[in-house]
Image: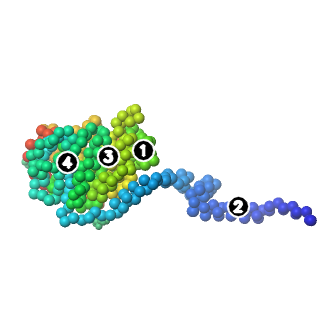
Amino acid sequence: MPAPRPRPPMKGPVWIIALISLIILLLIGAYMVPLGGYLFCYFFSGLGCKSISEWLPLTPTREYSDAEIAARGVIRDILQTPPIQTKTPKIAFMFLTPGTLPFEQLWDKFFDGYEGRFSVYVHASSEKPEHLSRYFVNRDIHSEKVVWGTNSMVDAERRLLGLAFQDPDNQHFVLLSDSCIPLHNFGYVFNYLMNTNVSFIDCYEDLGPHGSAGRYSEHMLPEVDYKDFRKGSQWFTMKRQHAMIVISDGHYYPKFKLYCKPGMEGDKNCYSDEHYLPTFFYMMDPGGIANRSVTHVDWSERKWHPKAYQAQDVTNEILKNITSIDESLHFTSDERKLLVDKACMWNGMKRPCYLFARKFDPEALDTLMHHFSNYTTI
Ligand SMILES: *[C@@H]1O[C@H](CO)[C@@H](O)[C@H](O)[C@H]1NC(C)=O
Ligand SMILES: *[C@@H]1O[C@H](CO)[C@@H](O)[C@H](O)[C@H]1NC(C)=O
Ligand SMILES: *[C@@H]1O[C@H](CO)[C@@H](O)[C@H](O)[C@H]1NC(C)=O
Ligand SMILES: *[C@@H]1O[C@H](CO)[C@@H](O)[C@H](O)[C@H]1NC(C)=O
């Protein structure tokens, strides 16, 4: 047997071919897989590459549990199915109140003449209300105690939605408190809410102690990620499809029920009425919400509670002033402090932001009644 021929040492041209092939492979890789691009940029930086982090895959899409796959499928289908059109579409006005509504007479004025285009529901959490208006008589629903800042608040909102949902004519749902007043006439409000495809749900990111930093809990993982945690005022309006996904949500709400409450983990105070709906909609249908509330409230004093308008504060000028605001503000608890949204848009057009306002002192009723027809000319 002849002895195996010793391998000749690699010659120059072979090296060059090997190197060129490697470069070609990496170039192809750069366009096909992130890792190839990463390597390419690593070896040949300065060739107009994007920063390395952009080549790395974004947060890996997590694997959903069977239950979450099912929940998401149901939600997706509801969002893609327009609700049945009824002959007499209505708006459900849902009042969340401890007892008697101080502005019932004002609301009576607001509803007068628009019978058949709205329905009223009252959730009175501590005492049976006395009703003065025919639109409110017999409209109390089964209620349970509501403790401010706890999940009982969101439970009450869901109870109202669940009941109002029974009437197929209700196409849009509005949550109001006992201190809320209408800012426009009924026709304007009806048109504003019914002739749009979005829900007016407040939603923004607050990275400070009264937002994600102080309130988010990792116990909400994997369903609710830190980067999805959002904040917003609880006073929403929502279209029927959105009401349906809230009522049927048995997957995400339990996470808030368990891990977003006052006195969590020793010193965390999370308030689900400020986080559940903003976060849920940010995750499920971010393009379907306006990210702002249509209920005005004045936080500019930066206290724990918003400014309450007393009887002497209520003038025609101040009402006109609130009614004409067309930029929405968000106060955050981080160093940014104030986020100014450019403008309040409605179907792509700039429009006044607010349909309702709070908080008004019960004493202001007479003044409001006096000015009502003047400030609600539109
Ligand atoms: C709402 O959506 C429906 C269906 O996508 C569309 O036909 C309609 O024009 C939209 N309405 C508005 C006011 O955008
Ligand atoms: C609301 O914010 C989301 C992003 O969080 C955005 O996709 C959506 O377009 C916003 N909605 C409107 C009406 O601007
Ligand atoms: C509304 O009131 C605010 C604060 O009092 C004032 O700064 C603003 O100029 C007023 N706007 C109008 C349109 O009157
Ligand atoms: C109604 O509004 C007009 C103009 O804004 C004002 O001049 C008038 O005094 C108001 N009427 C009442 C009763 O306040």
Front tag of 3 and 1: 1
The amino acid beneath tag 4 is Ile
Q: Quadrant of residue 185?
A: bottom left
The amino acid beneath tag 2 is Leu
The reply to whether the residue tagged 2 has its Cβ within 8 angstroms of ligand 2 is no
Of the numbered discs 4 and 2, the one sitting upstream in the chain is 2
Q: Looking at the image, which residue sits at the far right? A: 1
The amino acid beneath tag 3 is Gly
Of the numbered discs 3 and 4, the one sitting upstream in the chain is 4
The CA distance from mark 3 to mark 1 is 18 Å
The CA distance from mark 3 to mark 2 is 57 Å
Q: How crowded is mark 1: few (under 14 residues within 10 Å), some or many (20 or more)?
A: some
Which element type, helix, strand or loop, lies under badge 3? loop
Find residue 220 and name its label: 1
The residue indicated by pointer 3 is 232
Find residue 19 and name its label: 2
Q: Is residue 211 left or right of residue 107?
A: right
The CA distance from mark 4 to mark 1 is 32 Å
Residue at 34 percent of width and 36 percent of height:
262
Q: Is residue 121 left or right of residue 23?
A: left
The residue indicated by pointer 4 is 141
Q: Residues within 10 Å of mark 3 (few under 14, many from 20)?
A: many
Residue at 21 percent of width and 54 percent of height:
92
Determine if residue 158 is in view: yes
Residue at 10 percent of width and 57 percent of height:
113
The reply to whether the residue tagged 3 has its Cβ within 8 angstroms of ligand 2 is no
The CA distance from mark 3 to mark 4 is 26 Å
Of the numbered discs 3 and 2, the one sitting upstream in the chain is 2
The amino acid beneath tag 1 is Met
Residue 296: x and y, percent?
23, 46
Front tag of 3 and 4: 4
Determine if residue 192 is in view: no
